[in-house]
Image: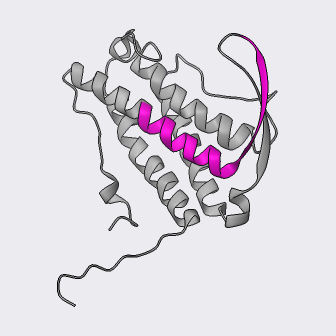
Amino acid sequence: MPGETQTRTVDEVALARAWLDWLAETRRGYVETLLGLSESDRRKDRGASFPSLEDIFLHILDNNVWWLESIPQDRQKTNQGVEGPLSHKDIERAAKRVEKIDRDLAASLSPVRLTESYVVHGVEGNGKPFEMRVNLRTIIWHLVEEELQHRGEMNALFWQSDVDAPTRAWFSSPIAE
């Protein structure tokens, strides 16, 4: 009927895949914009959640390595995360590594896989050790939240420096209506 809209239902696996792919794809703009800055500008302490734009971006990458590689592969004690400062080439390499992790995970998702549970060992900000159990579903949605939060922070810092932030709307996702 005219004026009637059709609603398409998207299951959680398809939505998680789309978000992981969208994050991987749009992260490239952040790599390009970050590496378009001089080394001193990208490492300048801006008083943010992590001191510099580079530090914030490396935190995003490190989160993906920790949650999507080290936790599922039970390598928490031998985690080989992403720490800076890094050279231009090393940032590109780390971003490609994380893109592969994200895309491989997206391709492997299933309803059963989303329920896989892991024990996470960590240390609270006050130095107290903790242990928690978390499933892959919660990990993925936590990473979406984390990355969007830190991208927003980076956007504001780019704009404060008169640099065009590489924003790209979710409308560009293949599952967006």
Task: Establish if 44 lies above or below 8.
Answer: above
Image quadrant containing the C terminus: bottom left
Q: Mainly helix, strand or loop, the magenta region?
A: helix
Q: Looking at this view, is 97 or 121 the one in front? A: 121
Q: Quadrant of residue 68?
A: top right
Instruction: Give x and y (percent) for residue 17.
Output: 54, 60
Answer whether residue 64 is visible to the viewer in this image: yes
Residue depicted at x 62% and y 55%: 104
Please provide the residue range marked out in magenta. Answer: 127-149
Q: Looking at this view, is 64 or 118 the one in front? A: 118
Residue depicted at x 55% and y 18%: 84
Task: Establish if 100 lies above or below 171.
Answer: above
Instruction: Give x and y (percent) for residue 100.
Output: 58, 49
Task: Establish if 44 lies above or below 118.
Answer: above
Residue 113 is one of the magenta-drawn residues: no
Residue depicted at x 72% and y 60%: 113
Instruction: Give x and y (percent) for residue 31.
Output: 40, 35
Residue 146 is one of the magenta-drawn residues: yes
Count of numbered badges drawn on the protein: 0
Q: Judge from the rendering whether residue 16 lies leftward or rightward of residue 52; answer left or right.
A: right
Q: Judge from the rendering whether residue 140 lies leftward or rightward of residue 69; answer left or right.
A: left
Q: Judge from the rendering whether residue 38 lies leftward or rightward of residue 76; answer left or right.
A: left
Image quadrant containing the N terminus: bottom left
